[in-house]
Amino acid sequence: MTFEETYLNDNILDALYDMHFEEMTPIQERCIPEILDGHDLIGVAQTGTGKTAAYLLPILSMLDDGGFPKDAVNCIIMSPTRELAQQIDQAMQGFGYYLDGISSVAVYGGNDGNRFDVETKGLKMGADVIIATPGRLLSHIRMGHLDLSRLSFFVLDEADRMLDMGFSDDILQIAKQLPSSHQTIMFSATMPTKIQQLAHTLLNKPVEVKIAVSKPAEKIQQSAYVCYEAQKLGIIRSLFKAGELQRVIIFSGKKDKVKDITRELKHMHINCAPMHSDLSQAERDEVMYRFKTGQVDVLVATDIVARGIDIDDILMVINYDVPHDAEDYVHRIGRTARAQRDGVAITFVSEQDMRYFADIERFLEREIPKNPLPEGLGEGPEYKPVAPRKNTRGKGGRHRNGKGGKPHHGKGKKKSDVKPF
């Protein structure tokens, strides 16, 4: 389906033409009509599927069509991190190129001490669209810098990451400031119970759209070590002794374990740095900058960086523990083998994680090779996959009568590669 077959207005279509967008991705094809029709929506889709455009395009089209207050904030887009907020802001500038009457401001904090003042000035001048991290937006609300009582659109992007980072209370406090008539749109890469509960709280009879998770890239060489918890550091010591490893991410599901792993790696004289939710935004920015520029060889992280941050030259991903969701496994190892490069993904499977790893193998429809433990570590536990557990997760229209009243017909545009935001 092409963008011209929707009821997106001409100004949006002109911008898409300039950006060489024509064919919609599956998430865009299913979400754009529903959002234009005014439905609350929850979309379950991984990074790279084009979800940013799936909500930005219909919202910008409706704002440009008119009928919304000129002296009010009309749309809030919540982002878990500064990096994602910046990406959304860049997409906003591209899609909104021909929208002279639509203003926006990004509110996400950072290292610059003057930034809060700049944000405050932008908010007081008025903005149709605000792209914000939860804590920063709440600070501005508490200081009286903006009024959300006439808001029309409330978007939560990567909602699962926001909850993982402890923003649940902030989101609920912001939601209390909103009018009952607004439209809520939520996107999440996964659909655990906590996301279902949040959706039930915030959304009104939502349409649910789920796009199947893609399998990992074929270029990723996947393997596993079946081991006891006490053997994991010995495996890492052996891996790093075998070669001068650089551009490595080690994932763990718990921030306390990330801190412990980092401390042990430093004792091994491995050039590493931690990334977890206890760090301030400024500290996370500094760590990511040092890792991207090669000043740090190994990043030890929770799932904060499993999605949404583009680093193209990661050579190896190590899962220190097994993700409890197959989709999280795909997101983690998807940090490597990008931009046509090869990559390696190694997972440590302890006795208590065997059932989760078996779930991952079933999802991938393949058995992941098991490596022998390095010499001197002794025997590991026997790998005993268990029977599949019952899946209790959630299941994965019409067009608005808007400006023009019919699909936009073209300008002789040629098909081009889709470049999803």
Image (spheres, rainbow, N blue to C red):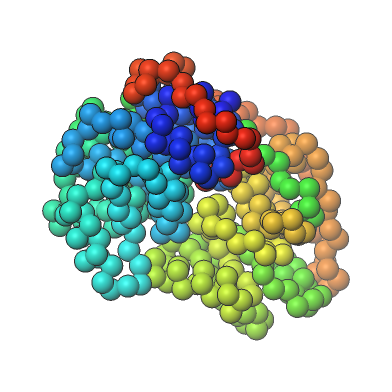
* Residue 258, horizontal then vertical, whole percent: 55, 66
**In this picture, is 240 found above or below 225?**
below
**In this picture, is 48 found above or below 11?**
below
Nearest the viewer among 168 and 205 is 205
Asked which quadrant contains residue 106, the reply is bottom left
Which residue: 22% across, 32% down? 68
* Residue 355, horizontal then vertical, whole percent: 69, 42
Which residue: 23% across, 29% down? 67
Task: Pick the quarter of the image with the N terminus.
Answer: top right
Q: Which residue extends farthest front? A: 412
Q: Is residue 215 left or right of residue 327?
A: right
Q: Is residue 289 left or right of residue 341?
A: left
* Residue 57, horizontal then vertical, whole percent: 42, 36
Residue 164 in view (yes/no): no
Q: How many marks?
A: 0
Nearest the viewer among 241 and 151 is 151
Asked which quadrant contains residue 292, the reply is bottom right
Nearest the viewer among 73 and 103 is 103
Nearest the viewer among 389 and 282 is 282
Which residue: 73% across, 33% down? 387
Which residue: 75% across, 59% down? 341
* Residue 219, horizontal then vertical, whole percent: 78, 52
Residue 293 in view (yes/no): yes
**In this picture, is 392 found above or below 358?**
above
